[in-house]
Amino acid sequence: MKILVCISKAPDTTSKIAFTSDKSSFDENGVQFIVNPYDEWYALVRALELKETNGGNVTIITVGNVADETIMRKALAIGADDAVRIDSDPKDAYNTAMQIAEYAKGQSFDLIMVGKETINYNGSQVGGMISEALGLPFVSLASKLDFLGNKLTLEREIAGGIQVVEVDTPAVISCAKGMAEQRIPNMRGIMAARTRQLTVIPPISVEELTSYVSYDLPPVKSSCKIVSADNMDELVQLLHNEAKVI
Amino acid sequence: MILVYVNTDNGLSKASKEVVTYAKKLGDSITVITNGNAPNNVLSELGQYGASKVLVDRSVSTDDLQQLIDLVAYSAEATGANTIIFSHDLVSKAVAPRLSVRLKAGLVSGAIDIPNAEGAIRVNVFSGKAFGFVKVNSVKKIVSLLPNSFQPEIIGGNCSVEEYSSGALKGRVKVLATKKPEGEIPLPEADLVVSAGRGLKGPENWGIIEDLAKSLGAATACSRPVADIGWRPHHEHVGQTGVAIRPNLYIAAGISGAIQHLAGVNGSKVIVVINTDQEAPFFKAADYGVIGDAFEVLPKLTEAVNKFKSSQN
Ligand SMILES: Cc1cc2nc3c(=O)[nH]c(=O)nc-3n(C[C@H](O)[C@H](O)[C@H](O)COP(=O)(O)OP(=O)(O)OC[C@H]3O[C@@H](n4cnc5c(N)ncnc54)[C@H](O)[C@@H]3O)c2cc1C
């Protein structure tokens, strides 16, 4: 089974979010980058489990610059076989997806897996876009994935519930919580990943359909009003009369 | 010309009224496209929020998301629409990105505002820790609107409903089974949410959360560790790696307020925090705080809500 897992870098979840003084871009100063949790915990780990039961190999791919090699080595340390970087600063989701689709075109992957969204841009766009570009079926927000014969059986989130679906490979899957458990790489994996050859591919020229023109931080809350634990009637009145939410 | 996809499987949800209201702010001639079996008199009510007409293809089921893409693509072509609006939900997350590639239409997911003077649309980024302003460079545009970002506004009367046969082809993903617990309010759409964390000590104690939720007509949510250890279902997990919500009222009991939790809930209009520890970081993000034991405070709050509700009737 040949699996491609798309990974993206994301700021560590404890990072303080700040922007450059003209608010035009994210201030990366002092920010630690990690593999986007959905890509790592769910897509990559489930891909590795499938390889372990069915044989085959797992390639990870990212669109990014040379600084992203840290997250690629992390994915290799966890167990990926090959790592590919398309040498381009990631632009919008469309550009990213077209770069990955172009790479995947000639490679006959059985499965292309993405995390359900990144924790920095939260778009939930790249997986669906890759599937459309390649003409492959797409299952979004899958929380369970099994493979038998050439069929995938999946559970996906729907409004207020879960749906069990079936589709033939090849397919593109976006992976959500429930699909696998986080794996901590061991020392041997980390050491071996350090010296592994990374494949670097030049980008193709693709337009950007969208661009982020600026950023802003939400207003800071004014101070919290403390209500006595013995006076819940007062809290209800405040919620009704002052906050007007009930 | 603006096309709005509305899911009417469960009648007219609040989100469906929000997207039509939003579309009406962007332009005048609004066509709604929908599928499934909602009766015509229900669909025609979308006119009150600004729809000029509703097209319904009854042969397309929401189970077949690939067919939905065709349905929206064909109806966009038929109506000459350059802008397509969705609600940012589980259907649009499957459909809108594919449509974006098919139509070469820039996609703005999770919009929370109408375009500003420069034509850029505000979205949540960094899982709710910041805002981004996105511009679409292509002629065709797709926007998915985050639920609870816009209040539905009634501006007129009912509109016409036309049967529409799109000829959308069946997709390749087969649905084997659907499991839907009855009667729950979908968390992303809920106006009021009652949430609890590890401070509740065990799943057997969730009765006091459910009682309060029931009295308020609220949905229930939880922190990540609570879902991870299986005290509550995964779909209740809110935060940076769970569902991001922006209800009018978020009540958090026994949740410390870690940065990853706050990321998913700080878009809430009003936050109430109940915690034994007055140093809990959540109080910094709260509008109202109660320093106390959730096991004592929650039943009292439920009682106070019940008393208030019966005084209102
Ligand atoms: C990459 C990453 C992603 C994450 N994503 C998320 C996410 O999406 N969502 C999320 O929630 N977390 C997330 N976390 C976890 C987060 O860091 C916190 O560990 C978690 O939110 C804590 O959950 P909690 O508040 O329920 O538990 P705790 O931190 O253990 O807090 C329990 C609270 O209950 C209070 N308490 C105890 N007893 C009572 C009582 N009787 N009455 C009232 N209060 C009481 C305590 O004072 C304490 O404040 C993530 C972490 C990482 C590293």
Image: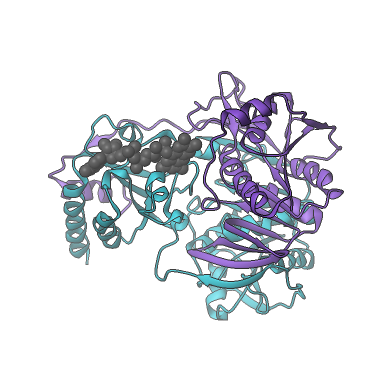
In the image, ligand 1 is in what quadrant? top left
> Eyeballing the image, is A41 above or below B169?
above
Question: Is residue A33 something that shows in the picture?
Answer: yes
- Of the 4 image quadrants, the one containing the C terminus of chain A is bottom left
- Rendering colour mode: by chain
Left/right placement of residue A11 relative to residue B107 reads left
| Total numbered labels | 0
Image position, residue B35 (x, y; %): 63, 73
- Chain coloured cyan: B
Left/right placement of residue B231 relative to residue B59 reads left
Image position, residue A79 (x, y; %): 65, 38
Q: Nearer the viewer, residue B9 or A35?
A: A35
Left/right placement of residue B5 relative to residue B187 reads right
Q: Nearer the viewer, residue B25 or B313?
A: B313
Image position, residue A205 (x, y; %): 86, 37
> Eyeballing the image, is A88 above or below B121?
above
> Eyeballing the image, is B6 above or below A61?
below
Q: Residue at x 77, y 40 (%)?
A: A208
Q: Residue at x 49, y 66 (%)?
A: B13
Q: Nearer the viewer, residue A238 or A103?
A: A103
Residue B6 lies in quadrant:
bottom right
Question: Is residue B103 something that shows in the picture?
Answer: no
Q: Residue furthest left?
A: A230
Q: Residue at x 43, y 69 (%)?
A: B181
- Chain coloured purple: A
Image position, residue A202 (x, y; %): 85, 32
Q: Nearer the viewer, residue A21 or B113?
A: A21
> Eyeballing the image, is A13 above or below B308?
above
